[in-house]
Image (cartoon, helix red, strand yellow):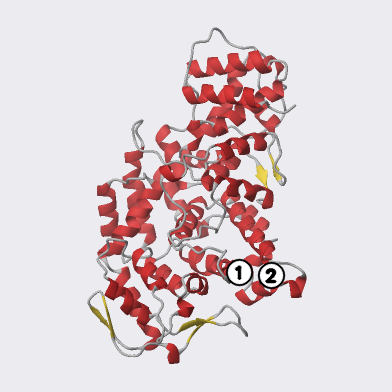
Amino acid sequence: MDITRRDFLKVLGILGAGAGAAAGCSPLASYLPTQSTGYPDSPQISSPEWRALNRLSFGPRPEERQRLTEIGLGNYLEEQLSPEKISDHKTNLLLSRIEVLEMDADALRNRGDKIFDNSDPALVLDDFRQATTLRQVYSKRQLEEVLVEFWTDHFNISVQKGDCWFLKIVDDREVIRKHALGNFRELLGASAHSPAMLVYLDNQENHKDAPNENYARELLELHSLGVQGGYSQEDVMELARCLTGWRIKEHFWRGKLKFDQDTHTPGAKTVLGKTIQPTGKGEIDQVLDILAKHPSTAKTICTKLARRFLADDPPREIVNKASQIFLESRGDIKAVLRTILLDGFPHINTENSPRKYKRPVNYLISALRSSGADTDGGRALQRYLKSMGQPLYDWPTPDGYPDTSAAWQGNLLPRWRFALDLVQNRIKGTKFDLKSYLVDIQEGDASFFIDRVANNLLGGSLPPGMEIELLSTLEETLGGNPLQAAEVVIAGVLASPAFQWR
C-alpha cells in the first residue's frame, strides 16, 4: 500500500515543527519484523564531526564516519587531499562500462551522429551524467568529487550550446578532474585551452577583423579577478585581442584546438597595465600568468571556496588568510583548502553557526548515500534533478549553478516526491532496502528504529519530545501496517527541514 499524502505530511509536520505533547510510548516495534542482515549502523560522532563530513562529502556513509573516528579530522582531510592514494575499485568497475569517458572529441561526435550508430547526442549525455552521479554516490574520493563539482560551476559550460554536448566530456576529463586538486594557474590554463570553453564563450568567433569579447570578459569577471577585481573595459578589449586566432577544428581531428596566426591581432597589447609581448599563441599565457598572481584572483577564488565549504557569507578572516596562502603558494589548491577547512570548520561547529542549504545534487546524492540505497545513476534518477532545478551540465549562463541558500529554498515539493519515491522503490534503476533498517529491532522498542534512522540520516537522535509524538502518530495512523510505518518515518526524515542542510 502506498503512503498517503496525509500520513506523510503529518510526519513531516512533526519533524519540521519540533516536539509536541504526547503521552507514553508506542508499541509500534511489535509489528516490525527482525531481519538477519542489514544496512550497517553508523558510529556515533560529534556534531562538529558530522558537519565537517557533510562539507567534505556528498553525505557521509558509515565507513567514512568510522574512519573519521579512527584517525581524526586532520588526518582524514589529508587522506582525502591525496585521492590517488585511495583505492576506489567499485567506482572504477562501474565506470569501466561507460565508454564515453575515455573517448576523444572526434569519437564522441561520431558516437552521437545518427549516420554512424543510429544514436543521438542525448544518449551520449545520458552516459556522461550517469558517470558523474555514480562517482558522487560511490567514490571513496569524496572531497575530490566535491571539488570537481565546485570547479565545474566555476568554469561553467552548458552542454546545450553547440558542440559543447561532446566537448564538455573531454573538458571534464582533461581540465576539471585533472586539475581539481592541483595548481590554479594550471587549471586556469587548461580551461583557457579547452575547446569546450572556447566554443561555449564564442572565442572561435573572435577574429582580428571582428573581435568577440565574450570569453575575455568572463575570464576576468568569473574565472579570475571577479566583478570588482579592478579591470576596465579597455582591459577586456585588449584581452580579447590577445585571444584572437584560437580555433576549433571542424573536420579532421574534429574538436581539437588550433592556433591560426592569420586571424590573430598583431602587435603588443596592454592588459591590467602590463605589456603583452606580440608572441602570437603565447600571448594568452602571458595574460594568465598575470591573472593567476593577482590579489583579486586570490580573493575571488578563496571567497568562493569558503562559500562552498563554510557559509553563504564566509568569515572574512578565513578568506583573507586563505588568499594570502593562495598568493604565497602560487595557487596551490590543496594548501588553500587546508586553511579554509581546518581554520574554518570551528566557525561552523556551534549551534548558532551558519549552515549550508543542500543544492539539489547534494540533497539527492546525500539521500542515496546516507540511506544506503543503490543506483545505476541513469535517466530515471536524472529526471529528479531536473525537477529540482539542477540537471547536470545544463546551467545556461557562465556563472554556474548558484551556491547560496536563497536560490534553492523555494522548491521543496520535488524533494518530498523524491523521498517518497525512493523509499517506496519507484525509481527505475535505484533500489532502497527498507528491511535492512529493521535488523535487531525488539518488540516494544520502536524508538530503536527511530534512533537508527535519525543517526544514519541526521547524524544524531531526534529530541525526546519529537520522537514520542512521532511514535504516537505512527501508531494512530499506521499501526496496522508496520512496513508502511517504517517507510513514512524514513521518507519523512529525508524530506524534513533537518535533512535539507549540510
Hey, which residue is sitting farthest bottom in the picture? 262
Front residue of 451 and 428: 428
Dividing the picture into quarters, in which one does residue 456 lie? Answer: top right
Where residue 130 appears, as percent x and y from the top left, is: 64, 55
Hey, which residue is sitting farthest front in the picture? 210
Q: Which residue is mark 1?
A: 166
Task: Using a 10 Å C-alpha cutoff, classify the residue at mark 1 as few (fewer than 14 neighbours), some (14 to 19) or many (20 or more).
Answer: many
Quarter placement of the C terminus: top left
Where residue 296 appears, as percent x and y from the top left, is: 27, 63
Hey, which residue is sitting farthest top in the picture? 23
Left or right: 30 with respect to 315? Answer: right
Front residue of 216 and 50: 216
Q: Secondary structure at mark 2?
A: loop
Residue type at mark 1 is Phe
Residue drawn at (35%, 42%), measured in percent from left and top?
A: 345
Decide: is 231 above or below 499: below
Check residue 338 in the rendering and tell me which mark sits there, or answer none: none
Front residue of 257 and 317: 257
Q: Badges 2 and 1: C-beta atoms under 8 Å apart?
A: yes
Using the rendered image of the protein, determine whether residue 160 is visible from the camera's viewpoint: yes
Residue type at mark 2 is Gly
Left or right: 387 with respect to 143? Answer: right
